[in-house]
Amino acid sequence: MSSGSSSQARSGESPPDAAHSPWLVCGQRIPHAVGRLYCLSYAGGSGSEYARWTDPDERVEIWGLRYPGRGARHKERPFRRLSHLVTALLDEVEFEPPFALFGHSMGALVAYELTRALRSAGRAEPTSLWLSACPAPHLPRSEIPIHRLTDSELIHVLARRYGTIPQEVLRDPELAGLIVPYLRSDHEIVETYVHHPGDPVRSDTHLCYGTDDVMIPEERLTPWLAVVTTPPTHHAFSGGHFYLNEQRQAVIKTISAHHVRS
């Protein structure tokens, strides 16, 4: 996070233009869009992945939020606490209404806490909140903490847990060393997160999940009801924890259709 732009935001000046912000990336600008969708990544993910997300009907303009410590921001120190990440997003990013937030796994926690922070700051809140593959925030974590493991242990645990670590990374400590810092910090964000009770979220809430996700079964999603104003809508997609890899267009169409109805 650049200290200059943070000072600007806190002093009431306009934040940097979205097109030139290190936090934001958009694959397709849609001047006539009915709204924007801001997407928050899972642990170890990059907001640049969402630059490949485009609405085929050109109704929703999709923006990825890029965390420090990876990709184009690899020289920056990654965040280790969710509250610090949310504060930086609040300071650095102007969320242009009407907008929705989409977060997958860790990104869902960020989206939820960001929505609460926007409300506390008296700023525009998302018209809809899309929470993907993430248990309700007040539930105890079922996974064993891993952020204090050695580099090798961390990489191999994640490979067994998610199956998303490439074999060349498992075989090459130098390659692993490039991604371990932000993998570790992201999992520290999740594993040190503590939910603090407060007013329920007012945004129209949607819960997305993979039907074959053994880590986040639907019963761990249902308790989101306790922290939102109205009962969430459930959306099931074929696939496991990373169902988005195969179901991206289906997810986009679902969100886009909701925006048009809103």
Image: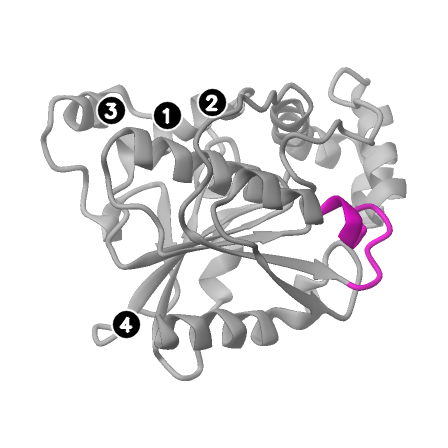
Q: Nearer the viewer, residue 12 or 98?
A: 98
Please say whether residue 76 is visible from this viewpoint. no
- Residue at (50% x, 66% y) in the render: 52
Task: Give SS at disc 1.
Answer: helix
Task: Locate the C terminus by quadrant.
Answer: bottom left
Residue on which disc 1 sits: 87
Q: Which mark is residue 83?
A: 2
- Residue that label 3 marks: 6
Residue 76 position in % (x across, y down): 44, 26
Q: Which residue is mark 4?
A: 34
At 40% across and 34% down in the image, what residue appears?
116
Q: Nearer the viewer, residue 40 or 261?
A: 261
**Residue drawn 70% across and 67% down?**
236
Q: Position of residue 75 (x, y in %)?
A: 46, 28
Q: Amino acid type of disc 3? A: Ser
Mark nearer the viewer, 1 or 3: 1
- On screen, residue 33 versus residue 261, left or right, reads left
Residue 65 placement, left or right of 218: left
Range of magenta residues = 211-221
Question: Real-space Cα distance between discs 1 and 2?
Answer: 6 Å
Vertical side of 85 occupied by 60: above or below = below
Q: Position of residue 198 (x, y in %)?
A: 46, 26
Residue 111 drawn in magenta: no
Quote the CA–CA distance across marks 4 and 3. Answer: 29 Å
Type of residue at label 1?
Answer: Thr
User: Do callouts 1 and 2 mark residues in contact (Cβ within 8 Å)?
Assistant: yes
Three-letter residue code for mark 4: Val
Q: Residues within 10 Å of mark 3 (few under 14, many from 20)?
A: some
